[in-house]
Image: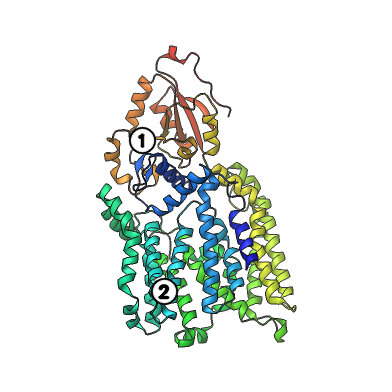
């Protein structure tokens, strides 16, 4: 058991600060947590100096606490997600113990999935939500096994839902409740809904969720309507979040995010209709609950009009239990039987995926895939140059693991050896992808730009972002960035954009109209910096003809507006190197 957590710890914690904070979510959430400390306001989150109520406060509290303990670094920002990932692996171990599945196998499977490794190193809410949903449902299962007698499990069930609610809104309590409803409904036990010890449970829920909600509502009277209508109901039922997708959106997300185990889940469970029909039998209640848990998460976000890959992360704990169950039921060569067909088919699928990736690397070299210009536009020049050799090695690795796995499955210790090979697959892929991944994230981050500004004599010069915004720039500069905008959509906030006129007129605002920038250029007494997308250069030059180039990368550039009085330019600061 200790070895499992050492492995998980290495996967989740190693090199937390090796990658800079990238756009948009990491930079935004880190900036909100930083402003929480600098403004000393732990009730109302702020983003770029503006009220930001798109998400509740719990995760921001965690990141801000990490900042206070370790300083304003990328590693400190990511530490809460890494801790939540390790906690989720521990909960999966507990879950396996309670439902009779291999504990070590379950923990290793969950810890080695691409999404667990990736989201344990990203400053976003999904890993914390996953931990709290897993903890809440563990409370329900304890309540179920105690015949609904032990109140402490009810407190755990409802209290964890309350914490999940102030992590990511109503989805925090909807996922556990819908899972329980589906489970009790399919097992024909609707009456047991009334045995959940609602009295003490609701008190626990309100004690964890209500204090912050009331405090935030008192400071911001429009918050309740926004939280329940705009950010929850309308986001779920309409395309207001501009994050839609087809019904099959989460199929490739599941296949890649849970790789390689997703392939074995499909070959191991699809088509077993006789086994599915027996799910409602009393002896299969644990399996039914695990299936309901995974299905509720997948179905809930499939029908939602707002989709992002990380939303299905709460389904990974039950999916790991289902994957471990396959290995538990395979006796290996000791049982005198050949490897099960689901295993052979899974390795064939992994072989096919490896060959596809291998061939795609040659396709890029031969010009059969996306053009080099298009790759550079999407990923940056450094990533484009690394992509083909990386795909080549990924394909070779997956082909090699599939061949070795099929060979090992006939050996005496087949189950353990094949599982170990698959556990190694994702870390090996990640190690080989380190260089292009770092190059890609660096291209998406403002760290390099902020260093150039801070190392120059213009470190204190006013900075305006012209119809664009880089979320991590304010974090690395240690101050808000003035945004020139017409609707503030560049901030990516559903709360700020509809209130742009209100924020434009507030004292000390950080958002301005294009006309304001023109007035600044006509009367500025010192140099002013302007950040813009290269695609918007012609618009900026038309607006401010006196602007001079300072710095440029593949997507953005920084320009300088000289002082309005040429005599004031004498002895002024020199631009940083390109």
Query: Is the C terminus in the top left, top right, bottom left or bottom right quadrant?
Result: top right
The numbered mark at residue 11 is none
Q: Position of residue 268 (x, y in %)?
A: 58, 78
Q: Is residue 490 visible?
A: yes
- Number of marks in picture: 2
Coloring basis for residues: rainbow
Q: Looking at the image, which is closer to me, 502 or 507?
A: 507
Q: Quadrant of residue 6?
A: bottom right
Query: Would you call the spot at circle 1 few (<14 residues within 10 Å), some (14-19), or many (20 or more)?
Result: some
| Left or right of 279 on screen, residue 404 | right
Residue identifier under label 2: 140
Q: Residue at x 48, y 13 (%)?
A: 570
Q: Position of residue 439 (x, y in %)?
A: 60, 45
Marked residue nearer the N-terminal end (1 or 2)? 2
- Where disc 1 sits, the SS reads loop
Q: Position of residue 383 (x, y in %)?
A: 61, 46
Query: Would you call the spot at circle 2 few (<14 residues within 10 Å), some (14-19), or many (20 or more)?
Result: many
Q: Residue at x 42, y 68 (%)?
A: 136
Q: Residue at x 67, y 82 (%)?
A: 331
Looking at the image, is mark 1 or mark 2 nearer the viewer?
2
Q: Position of residue 144 (x, y in %)?
A: 42, 79
Q: Is residue 359 visible?
A: no
- Where disc 2 sits, the SS reads helix
Residue identifier under label 1: 510
**Gap between marks 1 and 2 measured at Cα:** 46 Å
Q: Residue at x 58, y 68 (%)?
A: 107
Q: Quadrant of residue 241?
A: bottom left
């Amino acid at each position: 058991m200790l070895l499992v957590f050492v492995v998980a710890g290495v996967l989740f914690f190693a090199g937390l600060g090796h990658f800079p904070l990238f756009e948009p979510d990491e930079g935004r959430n880190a900036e909100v947590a930083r402003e929480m400390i600098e403004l000393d306001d732990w009730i109302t989150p702020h983003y770029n100096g503006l009220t930001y109520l798109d998400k509740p406060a719990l995760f921001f509290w965690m990141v801000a606490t990490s900042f206070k303990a370790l300083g304003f670094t990328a590693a400190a920002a990511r530490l809460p997600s890494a801790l939540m990932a390790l906690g989720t692996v521990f909960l999966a171990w507990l879950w396996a113990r309670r439902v009779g599945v291999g504990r070590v196998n379950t923990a290793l499977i969950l810890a080695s999935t691409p999404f667990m490794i990736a989201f344990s190193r990203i400053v976003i809410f999904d890993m914390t939500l996953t931990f709290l949903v897993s903890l809440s449902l563990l409370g329900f299962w304890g309540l179920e096994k105690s015949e609904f007698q032990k109140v402490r499990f009810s407190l755990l069930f409802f209290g964890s839902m309350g914490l999940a609610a102030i992590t990511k809104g109503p989805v925090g309590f909807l996922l556990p409740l819908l899972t329980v409803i589906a489970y009790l409904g399919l097992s024909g036990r609707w009456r047991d809904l009334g045995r959940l010890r609602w009295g003490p449970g609701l008190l626990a829920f309100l004690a964890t969720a209500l204090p912050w909600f009331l405090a935030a509502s008192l400071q911001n009277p429009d918050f309740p309507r926004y939280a329940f209508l705009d950010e929850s109901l309308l986001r779920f039922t309409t395309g207001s979040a501009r994050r839609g997708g087809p019904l099959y959106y989460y199929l490739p997300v599941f296949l890649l995010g849970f790789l390689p185990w997703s392939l074995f889940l499909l070959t191991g469970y699809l088509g077993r209709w006789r086994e599915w029909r027996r799910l409602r039998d009393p002896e299969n209640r644990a399996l039914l609950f695990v299936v309901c848990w995974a299905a509720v998460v997948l179905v809930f976000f499939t029908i939602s009009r707002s989709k992002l890959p990380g939303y299905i992360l709460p389904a990974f704990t039950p999916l790991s239990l289902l994957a471990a169950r396959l290995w538990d039921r395979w006796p290996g060569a000791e049982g005198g039987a050949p490897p099960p067909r689901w295993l052979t088919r899974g390795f064939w699928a992994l072989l096919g995926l490896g060959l596809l990736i291998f061939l795609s690397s040659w396709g890029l070299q031969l010009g059969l895939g996306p053009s080099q210009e298009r790759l550079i536009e999407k990923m940056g020049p450094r990533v484009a140059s690394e992509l083909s050799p990386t795909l080549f090695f990924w394909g070779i690795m997956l082909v090699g693991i599939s061949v070795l796995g099929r060979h090992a499955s006939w050996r005496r210790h087949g189950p353990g050896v094949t599982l170990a090979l698959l556990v190694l697959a994702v870390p090996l892929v990640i190690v080989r992808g380190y260089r292009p991944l770092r190059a890609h994230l660096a291209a998406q981050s403002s760290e390099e730009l902020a260093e150039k500004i801070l190392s120059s004599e213009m470190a204190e010069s006013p900075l305006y972002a012209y119809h664009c915004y880089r979320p991590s720039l304010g974090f690395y500069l240690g101050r808000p960035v003035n945004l020139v905008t017409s609707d503030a959509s560049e901030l990516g906030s559903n709360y700020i954009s509809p209130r742009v006129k209100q924020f434009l007129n507030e004292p000390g605002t950080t958002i301005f109209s294009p006309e304001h920038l023109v007035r600044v250029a006509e009367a500025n007494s010192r140099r002013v910096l302007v950040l813009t997308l290269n695609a918007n250069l012609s618009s900026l030059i038309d607006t401010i003809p006196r602007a001079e180039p300072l710095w440029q990368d593949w997507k953005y550039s920084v320009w300088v507006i000289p002082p309005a009085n040429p005599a004031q330019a004498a002895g002024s600061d020199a631009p940083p190197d390109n």
